[in-house]
Image (tube, grey):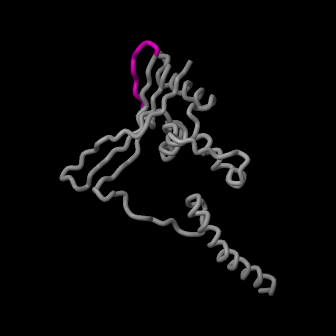
Amino acid sequence: MTPKQKFRIKLLFAAVILWQLPQSIIIARFGEPYPALVMPGFAGTMVDRDGNIRFGNVKCKVLFKDGRVGWVSAYDLLSQAPSSHHGSIMAHMFSPPPVTNDEWQPDSLKARLFPGRALSQIRHAQKELDSQTKEWLKRRLRVLFPSQQPYLVSFVWYNDVFNVNQRSPAAKEEPTGVREVRFE
């Protein structure tokens, strides 16, 4: 091994060690990046101190112009996407609008350093869906309900709550929010 190669190997080890401090600051400030040089925290279990386990879920209620109501699952709505992505897609695209106005400024340093996160924050802060997503949803509902015209879709978000301390655990639903999408 040449001295130049030895120096490069030492430099690589030094860079990995020195990167730990900035990475720790990033994790504390923005959450865990992917990929990261450290293992995730694996903090705790899903059970709260009362013995409840919560799983987020969503139901899609479709109101039609003739007064009928239809229900569609996230699985049916997103059947063209891999099922492992359904929860993330639903949460990213159709979660309830935020209550606060915690928007990122597009010209801020944070937005320039993390453009993907900035776009995600902007999308999450939208009260109304963007036109492309709305058109996709309308087309998808036409496929699922070919003879009906939807005018409103309500994405009803809730938590399925199971209590591990009960003898026979039964799920309770706790509503967490609603996003409504109207079609003209």
Q: Where residue 107 sits in the image (x, y, percent)? A: 73, 47
Residue depicted at x 48% and y 66%? 41
- The part of the image, by quadrant, that contains residue 120 is top right
> Horizontal placement of 63 versus 165: left or right?
right
> Horizontal placement of 94 versus 49: left or right?
right
> Horizontal placement of 18 versus 48: left or right?
right
Residue furthest to the left in view is 167
Return the residue nearer the eye: 89 or 121. Answer: 121
Q: Is residue 70 magenta?
A: yes
Residue furthest to the top in view is 66
Q: Is residue 69 magenta?
A: yes
Q: Where residue 161 sits in the image (x, y, percent)? A: 31, 47
Return the residue nearer the eye: 98 or 45. Answer: 98
Q: Which residues are magenta?
A: 65-72
Asked if 54 appears above or below 157 in the picture, the reply is: below
Q: Where residue 136 sits in the image (x, y, percent)? A: 58, 29
Residue depicted at x 44% and y 21%? 63
Asked if 27 appears above or below 182 in the picture, the reply is: below
Residue depicted at x 59% and y 58%? 30
Q: Quadrant of the N terminus?
A: bottom right
Number of disc labels: 0
Asked if 22 appears above or below 113 in the picture, the reply is: below
Residue depicted at x 71% and y 55%? 113
Q: Quadrant of the C terminus?
A: top right
> Horizontal placement of 104 versus 64: left or right?
right
